[in-house]
Image: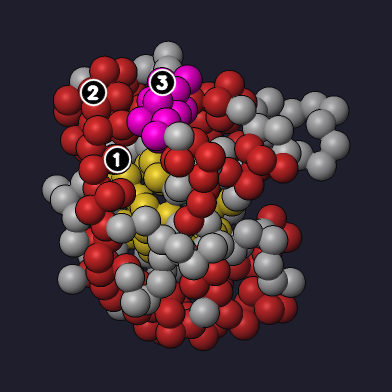
Amino acid sequence: MRKPMVAGNWKMNKTVEQARELVAQLLPDLQAFHTVERVICPPFTALLPICAMLKGTDIGLGAQNIHWEASGAYTGEESAAMVKEFCQYVIIGHSERRAYFGETDESVNKKVRAACEAKLTSIVCIGETLAEFEAGRTEDVLTRQVIAGLGELTIEQAQGIVIAYEPVWAIGTGKAATGTGANEVIAKAIRSNLVKLFGNSISQQTRVLYGGSVTAENAAEFFGQPEIDGALVGGASLKIPGFLEIVRAAAK
Ligand code: 13P
């Protein structure tokens, strides 16, 4: 019912030339997996050239951030409409942006609304830190992030949003969550809150990805879980055989 999705978050990696080379090598094989929604999220500088390379394919392009205002004196920022010129998707509220750039549930909420307005699909990132995990606060934290991050959206705006559950302790650490653990958290603390906000139908339609040290080796463990609809991949999305293997696992 929910189309699986695999998105590669390249973070702050690759010059234009390097990005072009990676996409050129990925494209022939990546194009084959039509049953999986495949998305590449390179840095801002590479969006235009990669957009040109993806033309005529069914592979999506995403930015890693937007500003919520439509225009104005916001040096160094890009609006949703600017991103929409090249992209169909945008990652919002990644834990690295929350940790290093002061993003909050409130700014996430504003950005998601701006993305809706521009008809960009938001990939909204949520997840607990190691301290929160160890203190048994995972459900509380995710509940707050879902309710505050997505609260007051209309049903129409909520439709099509993608959520990425990325436990902060699993990002870039090589210590992924377990498939069953992530599945349980998504059911208890994400889908249940989506039901509260938007009702059962939206909750069931919404794709929830897992992110955090996903590799070719562990991807199938996550994709085999009923509540997990794909992955937001960091480090492994920069490796050609690895990323293709993850997409292949999602296609099964
Ligand atoms: P890694 O896959 O490198 O752990 O990063 C996950 C992530 O942050 C994706 O957004």
Quarter location, residue 95 = top right
Q: Residues within 10 Å of mark 1 (few under 14, many from 20)?
A: some
The percent coordinates of residue 169 (x first, y second) are 51, 51
Q: Nearer the viewer, mark 2 or mark 1?
A: 1
Residue positioned 63% across, 59% down in the render: 11
What distance separates the C-alpha of mark 1 from that of mark 3? 15 Å
Whether residue 10 can be seen here: yes
Dominant SS of magenta comes to helix
Label 3 residue SS: helix
Q: Is residue 218 above or below residue 107?
A: below
Depth check, front residue: 135 or 64: 135
Q: Is mark 2 within 8 Å of ligand 1?
A: no
- Counting from the top left corner in percent of width and height, residue 125 is at 48, 42
Provide the residue designation for mark 1: 185
Outermost residue to the top: 152
Amino acid type at circle 1 is: Val
Label of residue 195 in the image:
2
Give the residues drawn in magenta, as a range: 136-148
Q: Position of residue 213 (x, y in %)?
A: 46, 64
**Quadrant of the frame with the C terminus:** bottom left
Helix or strand or loop: what does disc 2 sit on?
Answer: helix
Three-letter amino acid code at the position of disc 2: Val
Q: Amino acid at mark 3?
A: Ile
Residue at x 26%, y 18% (from the top left corner): 196
User: Along the horizontal axis of the image, is 130 left or right of 35?
Assistant: right
Q: Secondary structure at mark 1?
A: helix
Q: In the displayed structure, does residue 206 sit left or right of residue 68?
A: left
